[in-house]
Image: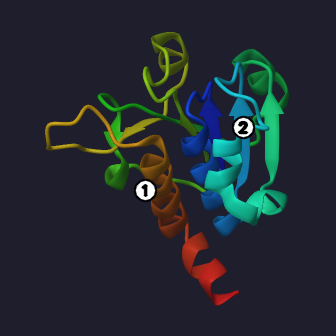
């Protein structure tokens, strides 16, 4: 599994997702333009001292990532469309793509890819925090593919 953050804007969210990736040995791709510097103190604080353990790749654009970085099936996320994540069949090597905190993934990106998932929300909020969504989706993908149990035994 891999996680892609498309044009992330809020440093603490990215730092928290980096920590999640370090904890699960999951590659993290940041696709620019980024809304912050990688030297941002809030980014570093959220990731704590786990940054050396993050398998991080930074891409200047979505087009460059598509051309040179994709390693598996892209599974795009949306707050409003796609299959509910628990009904989606994740596969080993899937790449979970999350959009910006304020706008999500643009329609042109969503429309270009077949596999889309959403996390159902029943309350009065528009969406979950990006780092919460990343954790829910990643752990479900690892559970479905058997990687969670395999890593837990290893």
The image quadrant that residue 82 belongs to is top left
Closest to the observer, 40 or 63: 40
Residue lying furthest bottom: 153
Instruction: Tell me which residue sits at (63%, 80%) in the image.
Output: 150
Query: Within 10 angstroms of label 2, few (less than 14), some, or many (20 or more) residues?
Result: few
Q: Which residue is mark 1?
A: 136
Instruction: Tell me which residue sits at (71%, 22%) in the image.
Output: 32
Residue lying furthest top: 108
Q: Which mark is residue 80?
A: none
Closest to the observer, 121 or 93: 121
Residue 21 shows in this picture: no
Instruction: Tell me which residue sits at (74%, 63%) in the image.
Output: 50
Residue 136 coordinates in the image, percent (x, y) = 43, 56
Residue 125 coordinates in the image, percent (x, y) = 21, 36
Specify whether 58 is left or right of 91.
Answer: right
Closer to the N terminus: mark 1 or mark 2? 2
Quadrant in which the N terminus appears: bottom right
Specify whether 125 is left or right of 67.
Answer: left
Mark nearest the camera among 1 and 2 is 2
Is the residue 23 above or below the residue 96 in the image? below
The image quadrant that residue 47 belongs to is bottom right
Instruction: Tell me which residue sits at (80%, 46%) in the image.
Output: 56
Tell me the element at label 2: loop
- For the image, the number of numbered tags is 2
Specify whether 31 is left or right of 143.
Answer: right
Residue 5 coordinates in the image, percent (x, y) = 62, 35
The image quadrant that residue 154 belongs to is bottom right
Query: Are circles 1 and 2 on residues that touch, CB within 8 Å?
Result: no
Tell me the element at label 1: helix
Q: Which residue is mark 2?
A: 40
Is the residue 96 above or below the residue 138 in the image? above
């Amino acid at each position: 599994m891999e996680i892609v953050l498309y044009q992330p804007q809020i440093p603490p969210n990215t730092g928290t997702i980096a920590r999640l990736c370090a904890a699960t040995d999951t590659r993290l791709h940041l696709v620019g333009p980024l809304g912050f510097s990688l030297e941002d103190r809030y980014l570093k604080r959220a990731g704590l001292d786990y940054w050396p353990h993050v398998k991080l790749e930074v891409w200047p654009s979505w087009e460059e990532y598509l051309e040179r970085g994709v390693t598996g099936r892209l599974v795009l996320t949306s707050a409003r469309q796609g299959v509910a994540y628990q009904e989606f069949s994740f596969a080993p090597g899937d790449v979970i793509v999350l959009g910006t905190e304020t706008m999500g993934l643009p329609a042109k990106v969503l429309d270009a890819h077949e596999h889309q998932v959403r996390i159902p929300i029943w309350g009065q909020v528009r969406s979950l925090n990006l780092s919460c969504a990343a954790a829910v989706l990643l752990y479900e993908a690892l559970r479905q593919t058997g990687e969670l149990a395999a890593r837990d035994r290893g």
